Image (tube, rainbow, N blue to C red):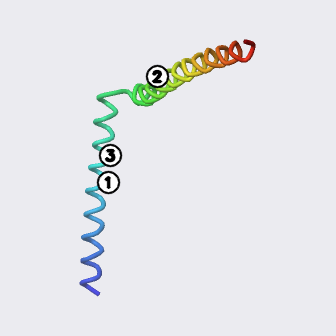
Amino acid sequence: MEEVNSYIDGLRAHYRKQVNRFIKEIAQSASEKKMSELIFEDIRGELETLEKDIQSGKAVLDRLNHCLGELNQLEET
């Protein structure tokens, strides 16, 4: 039974250290940058990617519309 208690005490100490380290890292990270900045930084990046994708899609649609117009002109002749 003593071995079990010793093992459990060791686990408690290990996890307590892990939790304390995690909290310390989060606190340090939060102090370096505001959490709102971290969140909006990700959103800003996603919006920029989405904007580029939309612009690319518009360019493809413009090219396809141009090709369609040329095909329509060929059919008329």
Residue drawn at x 71%, y 16% as measured from the top left: 72
Question: How far is the residue under mark 1 from the one under mark 2?
Answer: 36 Å
Direction from residue 47 to residue 12 in the image, left or right: left
Mark 2: which amino acid?
A: Glu
Asked whether the residues under the numbered discs 2 and 3 touch, taking CB atoms below 8 Å apart as contact, a structural biologist would say: no
Asked whether the residues under the numbered discs 3 and 1 touch, taking CB atoms below 8 Å apart as contact, a structural biologist would say: yes
> Counting other residues with Cα less than 10 Å from the Cα at mark 3, is it few (<14), some (14-19), or many (20 or more)?
few
Q: Which residue is mark 3?
A: 23
The answer to which of 7 and 69 lies nearer the viewer is 69
Direction from residue 65 to residue 38 in the image, left or right: left
Looking at the image, is mark 2 or mark 3 earlier in the sequence? 3
Residue 25: x and y in percent read 28, 42
Q: Element type at marker 3?
A: helix
Count numbered badges in the picture. 3
Question: How far is the residue under mark 3 from the one under mark 1?
Answer: 6 Å
Looking at the image, is mark 1 or mark 2 earlier in the sequence? 1
Q: Which residue is mark 2?
A: 48
- In this view, 59 is above or below 21: above
State the image quarter where residue 77 is shown.
top right
Q: Which residue is mark 1?
A: 19
Residue 21: x and y in percent read 26, 49
Residue drawn at x 73%, y 17% as measured from the top left: 75
Residue 35: x and y in percent read 41, 30
Q: Element type at marker 1?
A: helix
Mark 3: which amino acid?
A: Ile
Mark 1: which amino acid?
A: Val
Residue found farthest to the right: 76
The answer to which of 16 and 70 lies nearer the viewer is 70
